[in-house]
Amino acid sequence: AAHKAFAADRAALDLSFAPGAAQLDLRWAPHDVEAESQRMDGYERALVRTVTEARKARPTDTEHAYRITYCAYSLRNPPLVDELVLAHKAGVVVRDLIEDAKLNNAPEYAYNFADEVLSAGGFQIYPDVFNMPAEARTNGSSYMAGVPMKGRGHMHMKTRVFEWFDGREQQRRVLTGSMNPGDNAANNDESFMELLDDRVRDAYHTYVEALLRGDRSHYEHRNADFAGDTATAAAHVIPMLISDGGGGEPAAAKIF
């Protein structure tokens, strides 16, 4: 359901895809906090538990996917990390992609504890997703892998994919937005959305799965020099501007 404070913006977002069809479940931190279950971090952990419980209910099911995939700049929410360990122990395949610098034990990244907790919980840790053992990608194990970037860029994705069978059909939920899965992120001014449009959801899923396969091709165009080649650049860019509808400065004013 649309959140009342931003109902007008929600309608505008719907119209940008298909009139009358909800394409995003859009939430704004720290405003949409009527109940813990509606907080960004609470909703996220609830989805982890949904996949975990579905797997527990069908422990021998080999026909359907029970997977949780994270592709995020950092992962530093203690309750969430604990939930991922419990999911793994229940038989869910948990795959976590993170910026590789977070795994190098540098002093400036001392706050990143997730790899230690996940490792202790039975996850494999790989410094470079592009150089993982081939069998680790397909043997159904849970792991955390670093994603290196060329030059000075960051792996700054904030995408989560949840997959499970609910007894009737295979389910997939894709969450994204500006919010890292961090311990204090829900207290920031952040956007957080569940993608409901199949085309957009599949595009995110395809992108993440390419990374998990160690496919560099989508990174090659990200790091290429598009100067003067506007057609190529436009083919790889999806512009999105979101204003909060509260009477503040519109998003476009921050860019143009």
Image: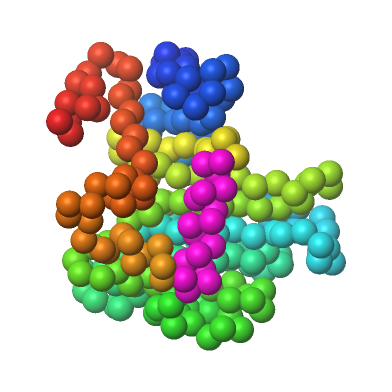
Residue drawn where x is 17% and y is 54% of the image: 227
The residue closer to the viewer here, 233 or 100, is 233
> Main structural element of the magenta stretch: helix, strand or loop?
helix
Image: 75 above or below 244: below
Magenta range: 199-215
The picture quadrant where one finds residue 20 is top right
Residue 204 included in the magenta stretch of the image: yes
Image: 230 above or below 11: below
Residue drawn where x is 54% and y is 56% of the image: 206
Quadrant (top left/top right/bottom left/bottom right) for the C terminus: top left
Specify the color scheme.
rainbow
Q: Position of residue 183 (x, y in %)?
A: 38, 51
Res. 240 visible in picture: yes
Image: 196 above or below 224: above
Residue drawn where x is 54% and y is 53% of the image: 205
Q: Position of residue 31 (x, y in %)?
A: 38, 27
Quadrant (top left/top right/bottom left/bottom right) for the N terminus: top right
Q: Position of residue 112 (x, y in %)?
A: 34, 66
The residue closer to the viewer here, 211 or 66, is 211
